[in-house]
Image: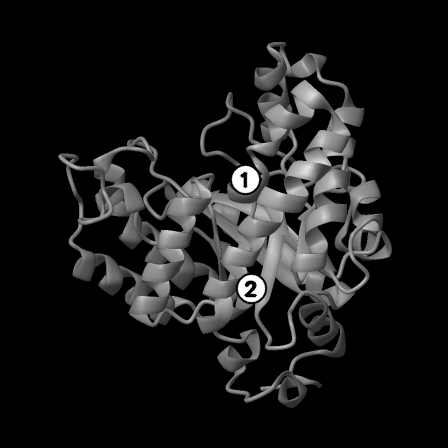
């Protein structure tokens, strides 16, 4: 299967020489502000914008020599984008951070004043949006979300730029940290991938959490803790989600520790899941927040140069068994997909 020149170039820009996407995510905005506020012991709104920019700049400058791409936001991340390694591709987020909690459904919103074309003009090789999604939500809610994704997909087609859809799975009646959600998560992940793999959405790559909660996998869960799946059941969920995805997909860390995320990637590899890489965020840099607040930018850069780089390198080792993105198009190389 051939893909358009712009989409092909964008996917090439964010991939390594094998066609695997080893990407770093630091497009957090309100979440990063909250982390900085907590570390400083102040209200998050008291954190100046410059602190977000400086933190992102340090992460970009120190870690991107070891990644194939970085995901940033145009609100606070454009200066960090300019400081990335010259061989590192750029994904830019198009959605507003968070959602309006006074409106039911966790409805998505695009950044005002931006479009896919404007993000490309700002340097984006690929466009990313985040969508909270549950197949168990009402039809009215999900119809709005389906239309929203189709709109973004159409914009990306018109701009000839790859469209990355980040799916954050949830359930309206269940806490995502609980065992009941853990039992429901495999179905939610599979049905979400099935829906948005349909051609009208024009999604090129999925960014999604692993289909199980590692804290409830037998043998990984804490001693004495309840389990939701045996190891073999967990492996089966990885395989089924992989088979359902009609597009290349990356795993996101969902805010878990680097150790737990690496365990997830080991399970994925054992299962044979055909994931094409990672977009790893807080698992890589979160411990640097306190260092930055307490000791400043130089201390953060020193920590990133040791602990951050080590974390990225461990992750890269686990990606040796990842599947190139072009394999989803039945190609043996990226060149075969070039239109």
In this rendering, the answer to whether 158 lies above or below 308 is below
Residue highlighted by disc 2: 205
In the image shown, does 30 or 148 lie closer to the viewer?
30
Q: Is residue 306 visible?
A: yes
Q: Is residue 78 left or right of residue 193?
A: right
Quarter of the image containing the N terminus?
bottom right
Q: Position of residue 112 (x, y in %)?
A: 76, 37
Q: CA distance from mark 2 to mark 1?
A: 21 Å
Residue lying at 76% horizontally and 72% vertically, measured from the top left: 6
> What residue lies at 59% left-to-right and 61% top-to-bottom?
22
Q: Position of residue 165 (x, y in %)?
A: 56, 55
Residue 274: quadrant of the picture? bottom left
In this view of the protein, which residue sits in the foreground, 16 or 317? Answer: 317
Q: Nearer the viewer, mark 2 or mark 1?
A: 1
* Mark 2 burial class by Cα count in 10 Å: few <14, some 14-19, many 20+: many
Asked whether 229 or 63 is in front, the reply is 63
Lower position in the chain sequence, tag 2 or tag 1: 2
* Disc 1 packing (10 Å; few <14; some 14–19; many ≥20): many
Q: Is residue 61 left or right of residue 291?
A: right
SS at mark 1 in the image: helix
Q: Is residue 93 visible?
A: no
The residue to which callout 1 is attached is 282
Q: Is residue 16 above or below residue 61?
A: below
Please provide percent x and percent y for residue 168.
Answer: 46, 45
Task: Look at the image and tell me in which quarter the C terminus lies.
Answer: bottom right
Question: What residue is rendered at 17% in x and 50% in y?
Answer: 229
The residue under the point 62% across, 10% down is 43
> As drawn, is 278 to the left or to the right of 74?
left
């Amino acid at each position: 299967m051939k893909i358009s020149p712009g989409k092909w170039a964008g996917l090439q820009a964010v991939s390594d020489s094998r066609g695997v996407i080893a990407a770093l995510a630091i497009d957090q905005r309100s979440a990063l502000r909250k982390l900085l506020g907590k570390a400083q012991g102040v209200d998050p709104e008291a954190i100046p914008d410059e602190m977000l920019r400086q933190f992102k700049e340090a992460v970009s400058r120190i870690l991107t020599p070891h990644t194939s791409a970085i995901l940033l936001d145009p609100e606070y991340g454009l200066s960090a984008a300019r400081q990335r390694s010259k061989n590192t591709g750029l994904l830019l987020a198009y959605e507003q951070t968070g959602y309006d909690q006074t409106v039911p459904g966790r409805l998505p919103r695009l950044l005002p004043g931006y479009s896919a074309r404007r993000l490309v003009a700002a340097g984006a090789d690929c466009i990313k949006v985040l969508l909270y999604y549950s197949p168990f939500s009402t039809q009215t809610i999900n119809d709005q979300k389906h239309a929203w994704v189709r709109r973004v997909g159409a914009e990306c087609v018109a701009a000839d730029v790859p469209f990355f859809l980040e799916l954050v799975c949830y359930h309206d009646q269940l806490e995502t940290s609980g065992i009941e959600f853990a039992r429901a998560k495999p179905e939610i992940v599979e049905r979400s991938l099935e829906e948005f793999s349909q051609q009208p959405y024009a999604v090129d790559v999925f960014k999604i959490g692993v289909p199980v909660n590692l804290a409830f996998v037998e043998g990984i869960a804490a001693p004495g803790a309840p389990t939701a799946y045996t190891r073999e059941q967990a492996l089966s969920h990885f395989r089924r989600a992989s088979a359902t995805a009609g597009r290349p997909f990356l795993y996101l860390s969902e805010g878990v520790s680097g150790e737990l995320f690496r365990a997830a990637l080991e399970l994925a590899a054992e299962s044979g899941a055909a994931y094409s890489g990672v977009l790893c965020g807080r698992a890589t840099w979160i411990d640097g927040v306190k260092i930055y607040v307490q000791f400043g930018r130089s201390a953060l850069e020193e920590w990133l140069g040791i602990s951050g780089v080590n974390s990225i390198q461990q992750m890269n080792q686990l990606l040796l068994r990842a599947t190139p993105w072009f394999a989803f198009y039945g190609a043996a190389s990226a060149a075969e997909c070039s239109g």
